[in-house]
Image (cartoon, helix red, strand yellow):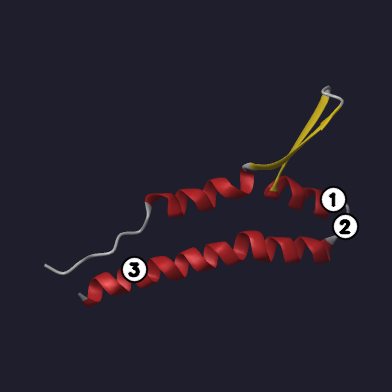
């Protein structure tokens, strides 16, 4: 029986949860706490008019990982079809 590859279950879930998960928390004198995610950072860049930086960060932290995961899933499916 040929070996079949399986897509890791966390692959798709991680892509959905990752951009909205907190990546940085700042505390000021134990009173004020600010938490940032990739999406909230991107929103702030748009509000401040920093569109070039918005495009760069969006490309490398959202678009590129989604494309890589899509190619990985395609490769796994193709490999399973060829067997």
Q: Residue at x 83, y 22 (%)?
A: 31
Cα separation, mark 2 vs mark 1, equals: 5 Å
Q: Are marks 2 and 3 in contact (CB under 8 Å)?
A: no
Task: Relative to 4, say whether 32 is above or below.
Answer: above
Q: Quadrant of residue 74?
A: bottom left
Give the class, few, some or many, for how many residues have Cα within 10 Å of label 1's Cα (few <14, many ≥20).
few
Residue positioned 67% across, 66% down in the render = 59
Q: Which structural element holds mark 3? A: helix
Coordinates of residue 64 in the picture (x, y in percent) = 59, 66
- The image shows residue 69 at horizontal and vertical percentages of 48, 64
Q: Nearer the viewer, residue 70 or 8?
A: 8
Where is the C terminus found, in terms of image quarters?
bottom left
Mark whose residue sits in front, 2 or 3: 3
Q: Which mark is residue 47?
A: 1
Going from the N terminus, do you reach mark 1 or mark 3 first? 1
- At mark 1, the secondary structure is helix
Pointer 3: what residue? 76
Residue at which label 2 appears = 49
């Amino acid at each position: 029986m040929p070996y079949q590859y399986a897509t890791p279950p966390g692959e798709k879930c991680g892509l959905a949860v990752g951009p909205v998960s907190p990546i940085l928390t700042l505390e000021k004198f134990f009173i004020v706490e600010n938490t940032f995610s990739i999406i909230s950072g991107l929103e702030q860049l748009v509000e401040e008019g920093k569109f070039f930086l918005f495009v760069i960060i969006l490309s490398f932290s959202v678009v590129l990982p989604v494309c890589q995961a899509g190619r990985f899933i395609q490769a796994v499916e193709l490999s399973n079809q060829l067997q």
